[in-house]
Image (spheres, rainbow, N blue to C red):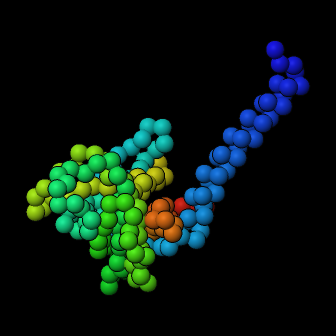
Amino acid sequence: MMTGKKLVISALVLALVQIGFLSWIIAGRAAILRSGREVLLKIEPVDPRDFLRGDYIILGYEISRIPVKMIANVPADKLASDDTSIVVRLKKGADGYWAPATAWFGEAPTAAGAEEADISGHVTQGWDLRGEDATIAPDYGIERFYVPEGEGLAIQNDIRVRPFGIRLALASDGTAQIKALVDGDKTLFEEPLY
């Protein structure tokens, strides 16, 4: 049986480990937001609601549907995708928005150039890779953006009549964090570092 002193020390150590773990997660996200490469993506939203966390927008992007013919390293005998990672190379367009240029399962064979950036995603099993128009739908971890309560529906309606975008911060390994929701040149919501 533990004595009172050992119990207090054990509780303090456990609390410090938990605080350290949460701080590590928050600091990693903040580091990407602070110093990651910024890219701007056009969005295609749907507006649901989370009863516990409020209004949010489900975001779709041009990079949400990658044509299989764009993936540079698909083996000829591969008929379906497995549970794997994907890297999509983005290129900056004349309009300021970034669009997919090429993709690879696993890792990119070369570093991105000056007007390019790599975003890492994940493809789940079961996608059919056959057919001329076959696509896969990677998950990048940026498909949901929370907005203040009561504003999701108004934003959803506005997005249907004019283009909106998401400003991302990309870490060197391709991990993405949403930095801001933008309406043309106007920033509507910006994510705080902490």
Q: Nearer the viewer, residue 149 or 114?
A: 114
Give the mark count: 0
> Which quadrant holds the C terminus?
bottom right
Q: Which residue is farthest left?
A: 131
Q: Nearer the viewer, residue 28 or 71?
A: 71
> Where in the figure is residue 74, as x and y percent of width and height?
24, 61
Q: Nearer the viewer, residue 158 or 100?
A: 100
Q: Which residue is farthest right?
A: 5
Q: Nearer the viewer, residue 88 or 55?
A: 88
Q: Is residue 171 above or below residue 115?
A: above
> Where in the figure is residue 192, as x and y percent of width and height?
59, 61
Residue, x 78% and y 30% (percent of image)? 11
Q: Is residue 68 visible?
A: yes
Q: Quadrant of residue 134?
A: bottom left
Residue, x 81% and y 14% (percent of image)? 1
Classify residue 14 as left or right of residue 92: right
Residue, x 28% and y 45% (percent of image)? 125
> Where in the figure is residue 76, as x and y percent of width and height?
17, 60
> Where in the figure is residue 171, as x and y percent of width and height?
51, 67
Residue, x 58% and y 71% (percent of image)? 35
Q: Is residue 76 above or below residue 90?
A: above
Q: Is residue 189 visible?
A: no
